[in-house]
Image (cartoon, helix red, strand yellow):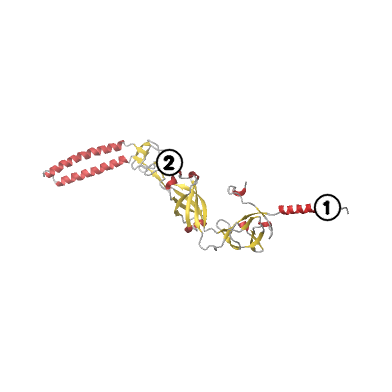
């Protein structure tokens, strides 16, 4: 045998061995890992809500007449006491002036009759009748003065004019809605919640909301009421009040807003050692549930676990078999073998949501 062939064969074997080693390195399974987390003592549910005014007020005159002027338009913000509209008050002023003349004249006559009564020239009965007529005239005068005041329609509270229903020169009766006012003194938020949250209403610890209109500032809310009957979509209507009115100036009726309900988990729902994992971290083999535990040397070990239901956020609850702090394979569990070394993928950056970059 040619002696020069032996070194060539040896070199080939070394090269093959090196290539085989490189291939074994390259063909390590890559896995993503996670750590078991304790079962949360509370859960947070998010729902879309809508800002609404606490009430809607129809503004109308207390007396009939012809509209002289309307001082507002739809969308205007008005403060309490702002003049909304005014009726033609000519006839009302004449009525007041006529009664004032009669009242002043009768007042002078009453004063003279009083002197005659003292002089015994007029009976006290006639004097009392005259005084009674004078008082009745005073009441009629005050009624006409009130009607004159009623020709001015003012905003009873601060708010936004939602609609204006009439034009100047139109005739209106008492009580007809000249304009509609949205009362903004106490805005509310209306939310529809599903039945599973309604059933946990006694465990609601905190409610808050935020809106992009106020830079997503978290605003504490206060529960006003929950409708005890579900609608056709099995949703329950919830009314919330703002616990702090400082941020209400930039919120308007009809604006969408995000609400969050913090709900405490029922006592003794799970053992103290229970933890949660993503559902796809667990696999079943011959009727037994397992997870892959990664040791510090990147070796995976098939570890049996005990399941204890599903948490509110959809993750699986494990009551035994693993401990908090262990590294568990959460992606790539299908092709692993017990004792196999794996490559652990780095966790995605917090700014790389979904690991899409």
| Residue name at image x 51 percent, y 51 percent | 47
| Residue name at image x 26 percent, y 41 percent | 141
User: Which of marks 1 and 2 precedes in the sequence?
Assistant: 1
The crowding category of the residue bearing disc 1, from other C-alpha atoms within 10 Å (few below 14, some 14 to 19, many at least 20), is: few
User: Real-space Cα distance between discs 2 and 1?
Assistant: 100 Å
288 to 356, vertically: above or below: below
Return the residue nearer the eye: 174 or 234: 234
Determine the residue located farthest toward the right in the rendered image.
1
Tell me if I can see residue 316 in this picture.
no
Picture quadrant where residue 94 is located: top left
Q: Which residue is mark 2?
A: 163
Residue 63 image position (x, y, % from top left): 33, 42
Q: Which residue is mark 1?
A: 7
Return the residue nearer the eye: 155 or 167: 155
Residue 166 image position (x, y, % from top left): 40, 38
Residue 99 image position (x, y, % from top left): 24, 39
Task: State which mark lies toward you, 2 or 1.
Answer: 1
Picture quadrant where residue 296 is located: bottom right
13 to 251, vertically: above or below: below
């Amino acid at each position: 045998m040619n002696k020069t062939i032996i070194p060539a064969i040896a070199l080939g074997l070394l090269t093959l061995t090196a290539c085989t080693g490189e291939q074994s390195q390259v063909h390590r399974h890559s896995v993503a890992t996670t750590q078991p987390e304790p079962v949360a003592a509370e859960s947070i549910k998010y729902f879309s809500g809508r800002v609404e005014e606490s009430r809607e007020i129809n503004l109308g005159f207390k007396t009939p007449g012809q509209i002289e002027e309307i001082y507002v338009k739809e969308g205007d913000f008005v403060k309490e006491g702002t003049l909304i509209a005014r009726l033609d008050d000519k006839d009302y002023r004449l009525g007041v002036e006529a009664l004032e003349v009669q009242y002043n004249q009768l007042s002078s006559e009453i004063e003279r009759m009083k002197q005659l009564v003292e002089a015994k020239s007029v009976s006290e009965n006639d004097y009392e009748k005259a005084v009674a007529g004078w008082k009745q005239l005073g009441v009629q005068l005050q009624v006409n003065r009130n009607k004159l005041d009623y020709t001015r329609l003012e905003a009873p509270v601060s708010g936004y004019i939602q609609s204006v229903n009439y034009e100047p020169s139109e005739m209106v009766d008492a009580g007809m809605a000249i304009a509609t006012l949205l009362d903004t003194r106490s805005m509310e938020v209306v939310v529809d919640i599903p039945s599973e949250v309604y059933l946990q209403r006694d465990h609601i610890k905190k409610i808050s909301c935020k809106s992009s209109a106020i830079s997503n500032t978290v605003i504490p809310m206060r529960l006003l009421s929950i409708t005890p009957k579900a609608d056709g979509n099995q949703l329950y209507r919830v009314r919330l009040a703002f616990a702090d009115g400082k941020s209400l100036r930039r919120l308007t009726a009809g604006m969408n807003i995000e609400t969050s309900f913090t709900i405490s988990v029922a006592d003794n729902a799970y053992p103290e050692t229970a933890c949660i994992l993503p559902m796809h971290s667990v696999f079943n083999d011959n009727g037994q549930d397992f997870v892959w535990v990664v040791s510090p040397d990147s070796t995976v070990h098939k570890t049996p676990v005990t399941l204890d239901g599903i948490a509110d956020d959809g993750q699986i609850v494990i009551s035994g078999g693993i401990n908090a702090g262990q590294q568990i394979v959460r992606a790539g569990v299908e092709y692993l073998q017990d004792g196999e070394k794996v490559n652990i993928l780095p966790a995605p950056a917090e700014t790389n949501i979904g690991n899409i970059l």
